[in-house]
């Protein structure tokens, strides 16, 4: 958007948010006619695939990212693999139509190894209490090596695959009701080969988790650093300030508080980019709204909150809420003395009913107090939940 980057089609101007004194921002440094005209720096410090799809281009097997749904149709019986009752039971191959029980969500280990999560959140493995080859989906929560499968694609037709189980053998469909891991997988790839499946990809997420885990620990740091250093630059702030915009909203992810060594797959360095933004903001007289866009556990299951597979687990425990408060503590203490800090948005788009009003009230209350610990002037933004909610549900907490 700035002259030096005139060939970029910049997404930045797609999002303008106008906050005026009409909004229920908690606090009081309003001068009557001051209006914020802000632009959202989306897709910079929190990945959203649709904003910059090319970021994903260098990932091997980039159609098999975390959270991608795959359906497997056996070529011999012509029916789909299914986790009976959505998990907790056997794997069969007797479904003519694929929907939720027949969709396996990927947890990517590397470009060929994956764990397969079924509807009720359990993982596919081998029935260890049985004969050692029958397929089941009963492992909950923490999959390990014995739930890790290799997906081998036919190089002539990438949608024809074999699935190699952790016992070293391939899955095969002996009958509609019997799926076992005991094939050598050395057949023809033809329609008479019991170890061959045709894959339907139901799509998936393209967020920060998918991007960093897709590139893996060796390549992700370089890709992310390059992106942070080029997607938003000082000249953008210059451009913004000379075009009648007086604020930026900067979405950040919780892992920024663990910089420079965030937990895998996240990559250190986004904090440096945010530091730069505050320096530029001060230089060009721009207000900054920090927006916690991705909270630990994901507050809405969307890619822009860095959900791994669509799960939404934010706010389910007090510990998780406290971790989120700690991120706000970290950010506010770091930037409270910068005159550009204008507002802290405690959480972007929590989704009802997964994010309960009760957990949100707890968090907003604690988050407000932690901002006030460092700043008596920064506004605190408490966003409404998405979903079927009472639009006034936050009035009680916002008015205390
Ligand atoms: C599939 O197989 C399981 C196990 O034998 C059975 O309980 C289920 O009813 C079958 N479903 C269909 C649609 O054939």
Image (spheres, rainbow, N blue to C red):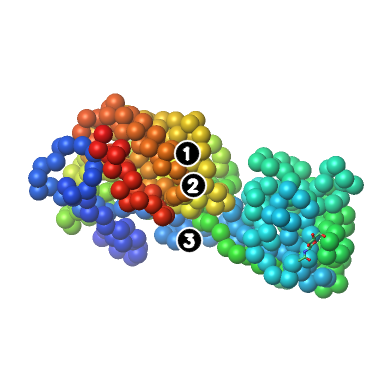
Where is residue 230 shown, x and y percent of the image?
Answer: 38, 52
Counting labels gives 3
In contact (CB < 8 Å): disc 2 and disc 1: yes
Q: CA distance from mark 3 to mark 2?
A: 32 Å
Give the SS element for disc 2: loop
In contact (CB < 8 Å): disc 3 and disc 2: no
Which residue is drawn at the image coordinates 83% and 70% (left, top)? 76
User: Is residue 136 or residue 113 the one in the foreground?
Assistant: 136
> Which mark is on residue 54?
3
Q: Count neighbours of disc 3 (C-alpha within 10 A) and say few if under 14, some if 14 to 19, many if 20 or more.
A: few
Where is residue 108 shown, x and y percent of the image?
Answer: 64, 50
Left or right: residue 201 versus residue 237 is: right
Q: CA distance from mark 3 to mark 1?
A: 33 Å
Q: Count neighbours of disc 2 (C-alpha within 10 A) and say few if under 14, some if 14 to 19, many if 20 or more.
A: some
Which residue is drawn at the image coordinates 15% and 37% (left, top)? 29
Residue to which mark 2 is pinned: 354
User: Is residue 140 or residue 142 the one in the foreground?
Assistant: 140
- The quadrant of the picture occupied by the N terminus is bottom left
Q: Nearer the viewer, mark 3 or mark 1?
A: 1
The disc, 3 or 1, on the residue closer to the chain's N-terminal end is 3
User: Is residue 8 or residue 178 the one in the foreground?
Assistant: 178
Residue 100 visible in the picture: yes
- Mark 1 and ligand 1: say if the CB distance to the nearest ligand atom is below 8 Å: no
- The quadrant of the picture occupied by the C terminus is top left
Q: CA distance from mark 2 to mark 1?
A: 8 Å
Left or right: residue 317 versus residue 385 is: right
Give the SS element for disc 3: helix
Q: Residue furthest left?
A: 32
Q: Residue furthest right?
A: 131
Left or right: residue 45 versus residue 59 is: left
The disc, 2 or 1, on the residue closer to the chain's N-terminal end is 1
Residue to which mark 1 is pinned: 315
């Amino acid at each position: 958007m700035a002259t030096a980057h005139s060939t970029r089609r910049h997404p930045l101007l797609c999002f303008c948010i106008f906050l005026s004194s009409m909004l229920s921002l908690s606090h009081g440094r309003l001068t009557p006619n001051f209006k914020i005209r802000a632009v959202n720096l989306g897709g910079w410090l929190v990945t959203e695939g649709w904003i910059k799809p090319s970021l994903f281009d260098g990932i091997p097997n980039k159609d098999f990212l975390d959270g991608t749904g795959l359906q497997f149709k056996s070529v011999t019986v012509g029916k789909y693999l299914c986790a009976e009752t959505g998990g907790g039971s056997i794997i069969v191959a007797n479904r003519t139509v694929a929907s939720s029980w027949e969709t396996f969500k990927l947890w990517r280990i590397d470009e060929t190894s994956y764990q397969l999560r079924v509807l009720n959140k359990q993982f596919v493995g081998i029935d260890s209490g049985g004969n050692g080859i029958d397929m089941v989906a009963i492992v909950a929560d923490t999959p390990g090596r014995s739930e890790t499968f290799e997906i081998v694609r036919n190089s002539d037709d990438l949608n024809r695959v074999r699935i190699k189980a952790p016992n070293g053998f391939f899955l095969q469909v002996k009958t509609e009701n019997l799926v076992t891991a005991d094939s050598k997988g050395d057949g023809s790839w033809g329609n008479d080969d019991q170890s061959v499946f045709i894959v339907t990809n139901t799509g998936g997420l393209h967020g920060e988790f998918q991007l960093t885990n897709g590139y893996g620990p060796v390549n992700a740091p370089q890709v992310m650093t390059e992106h942070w250093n080029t997607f938003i630059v000082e000249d953008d702030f210059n451009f913004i300030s000379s075009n009648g915009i007086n604020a930026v909203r900067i979405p950040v992810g919780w892992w920024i508080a663990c910089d420079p060594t965030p937990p895998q797959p996240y990559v250190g360095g986004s904090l440096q980019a945010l530091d730069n933004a505050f320096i530029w903001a001060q230089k060009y007289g721009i207000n900054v709204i920090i927006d916690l866009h991705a909270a630990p556990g994901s507050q809405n299951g969307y890619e822009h909150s860095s959900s791994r597979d669509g799960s939404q687990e934010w706010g389910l425990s007090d510990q998780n809420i406290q971790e989120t408060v700690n991120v706000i503590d970290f950010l506010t203490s770091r930037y409270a003395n910068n005159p550009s800090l204008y507002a802290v948005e405690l959480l972007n788009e929590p989704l009802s009913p997964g994010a309960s009003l009760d957990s949100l009230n707890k968090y907003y209350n604690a988050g407000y107090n932690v901002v006030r610990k460092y700043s008596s002037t920064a506004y605190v933004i408490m966003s409404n939940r998405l979903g079927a909610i009472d639009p006034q549900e936050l009035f009680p907490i916002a008015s205390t």
